[in-house]
Amino acid sequence: MPLKQEVNRLTDGMPTPQRATTVLDVARLAGVSAMTVSRALNQPQRVPAATRQRVQAAVEATRYVPNLLACGLRSRRSRLVAAIVPALGSPVFAETVQALTATLGAAGYHLMLGQSGYGPVGEDALLQAVIGRRPDGIVLVGVDHSQRARQTLARCGVPVVETWDLTSTPIDMLVGFSHADVGAAVCRFLAGQGRRRLAIVSGADGRAARRAQAFTATADLLGLPPPARVEVEAPTTLGHGRQALRQLLAQHAGVEGIFCSSDMLALGVLTEAAHQRIAVPGRIGVVGFGDQPLAADAEPALTTVRVDGARIGREAALRAIGRIAGSPAPELAALDVGFSIVPRCSA
Amino acid sequence: MPLKQEVNRLTDGMPTPQRATTVLDVARLAGVSAMTVSRALNQPQRVPAATRQRVQAAVEATRYVPNLLACGLRSRRSRLVAAIVPALGSPVFAETVQALTATLGAAGYHLMLGQSGYGPVGEDALLQAVIGRRPDGIVLVGVDHSQRARQTLARCGVPVVETWDLTSTPIDMLVGFSHADVGAAVCRFLAGQGRRRLAIVSGADGRAARRAQAFTATADLLGLPPPARVEVEAPTTLGHGRQALRQLLAQHAGVEGIFCSSDMLALGVLTEAAHQRIAVPGRIGVVGFGDQPLAADAEPALTTVRVDGARIGREAALRAIGRIAGSPAPELAALDVGFSIVPRCSA
DNA sequence: CTGAAAGCGCTAACAA
DNA sequence: TTGTTAGCGCTTTCAG
């Protein structure tokens, strides 16, 4: 019977071992207990260097990869933060996702990404799936969620950070900026250039709609005629921008200033304008949103709204981590990162 | 003592229950055992409708969300497939990620996304993290991995699908196309239009480099002068494209055809050409890569290389799922999805 | 068709 | 500093 202990020959370097290596295999090889292996890996400072090195060597030799499912189940900390984004491909959120990954990674957390699609339809199902994985924190883009989603989130006891928007009724924490202020500011910006006949081209997105609404309201306030409005599908493309300008010229020939809900849309407007030999910014001023890399290098260089997406990601991650670590810090729960209009050539 | 069982009042609807609801809570409420709840949720057909409905009602009432960490640990199936992509923001892979999500979702799997950054530097660490979560399958973009990564993957006993490229030595399964063939085809395409002085503008990416190499080799084969080559950083931007054309014109004024490693780069070349009043396709032909939405609507419309990214994602997902389900099907392990040159106006 | 027992791999809590 | 025991929440297995 005692010889049976010698059956384990997984460390020979053969492919596809029958059973994945566990702490016990490592412990055996290092001549310590499973608990010591666990400690050597998770709290290295609580283990003397000599022991730690023996464990490390055994980890290397066995190619041990801890089972984070088991870690998470037992410790009730999955070291996972989920982020739910409307569209993974959208360049608008790229910086935020990048910063989330980096900031969380530095703190030993992994990012779990989900795509909700615009609108709360897909979000509920996704949320269910996400919560099932027991993330330690959840970062959401946007503040428009179904009542059910809000309840689920509030009740599941996980820190939640809503981002890329502001609201007076956050679920928990908040890092964003006012889309209404953006709309108003861009309207004033265009009006300040003497442009009176304005228009909005925006994708099907609640935040873009909020910018558009404030834009329109501000135009009214300034005594300008009601801005024309063209809606396009999400995701917004260069083609949508071209088509939108065509439509605008057909129906509102005198348009003098256009606020687009994305830089790509704005690039489309610029492209169509060039094609039709319409002077930008001479006859029409164009403003984008997002300050993507393409904005600065467009022809003419695109005036646009800059939002510090990286900061949003960083601050959201820090808030999630902080709350996980136990700091309540309610006075820091909400943050307005603001925005700026980057004046270039197109308006 | 028996009264202690009545202490559980978590179902009152109060916020933030102290303890998350488990199968036992649901079982109690439905008047069945935990096992029956599990079966009602995972194998509904094996439970009579009446019981199933009682369980469903209890799930609703308690807002039960199964702990997938525990499910995965016990059943050894995490219902998770990991995908590792060089850049999450890159529109090139957007279709693939979309198709992966959809195909996996339809089969009851979730997609776990990771970003490796170009090059195998970040990939190894990421792989470790990913494997720790015990995915049921792993989808990789690219076939260039460190020796260590290849071993880890081969040994961990998880189905692996490499994508977006071909190789004679795949780790396991393969869905992609030949980048060398792309380079050769584009070279022949430009040469077929009588263009002899060619150039390549490409980002720092192994696959782009392979296309460039074959492009150059084919030019040699066709008796053309050696193509000029401009390298730019990843991710490729419109600005990089503009700058590349400037550089090209300064050093190789007679250039007649340019192959760009992305559509965005190509759009930059078109923009700079328009700015300098250089006729496209008259004096210079421009070919992109990726057939992004912007290609068709650029001015002039961009000739580019189309790859069916959605198909890659779908086929990769199906292969991963199939292997998980137990079908070895080695004859279907590799798939070449090919590519096509979409001739538009720019070349 | 249903339930009881056992245990997935790990770490919290306690003890030595 | 190290080890032992127990159990996280679920499902496999086997017995009714």
Image: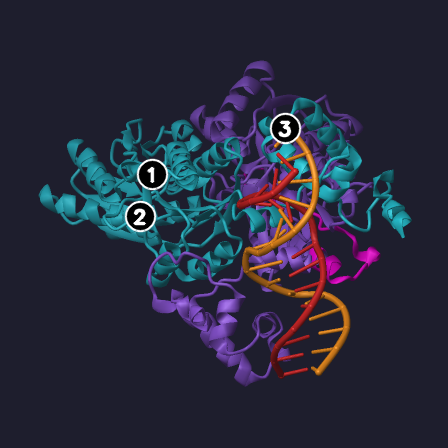
Chain colours: A purple, B cyan, C orange, D red
Q: Amino acid at mark 3?
A: Val
Please say if B297 is above or below C7.
above
Q: Is residue B227 magenta?
A: no
- How many numbered discs? 3
What residue type is disc 2 on? Ala
Dot 3 or dot 1: first in sequence order is 3
Label 1 sits on residue: B289
The residue tagged 2 is: B208
User: Is residue A294 in sight in this rendering?
Assistant: yes
Measure how far apart labels 3 and 2 are at the Cα level: 54 Å
Q: In the drawing, does residue A266 fall left or right of residue A167?
A: left
Distance from disc 2 to disc 1, alpha carbons, whole Å, reads 9 Å
Residue A180 on image: x %, y %:
74, 36
The answer to whether the residues at label 2 and label 1 have Cβ atoms under 8 Å apart is yes
Judging by the rendered image, the residue that carries numbered circle 3 is: B47
Secondary structure beneath label 2: helix
Q: Does A149 sit left or right of A287 as displayed?
A: right
Measuring from the top left, give residue A289's x and y in whole percent: 60, 39
Which quarter of the figure has residue B338?
top left
Amino acid carrying mark 1 in the image: Phe
The answer to whether tags 2 and 1 share a subunit is yes
Range covered by the magenta-colored residues? A320-347
Alpha carbons under labels 3 and 1: distance apart:
53 Å
Question: Which is more foreground, mark 3 or mark 2?
Answer: 3
Q: Position of residue B211 (x, y in %)?
A: 26, 46
Query: Would residue A113 appear left or right of A151 to someone viewing this image?
Result: left
Q: Chain of mark 3?
A: B
Mark 2 surroundings within 10 Å by alpha-carbon count, few (fewer than 14), some (14 through 19), many (20 or more): many
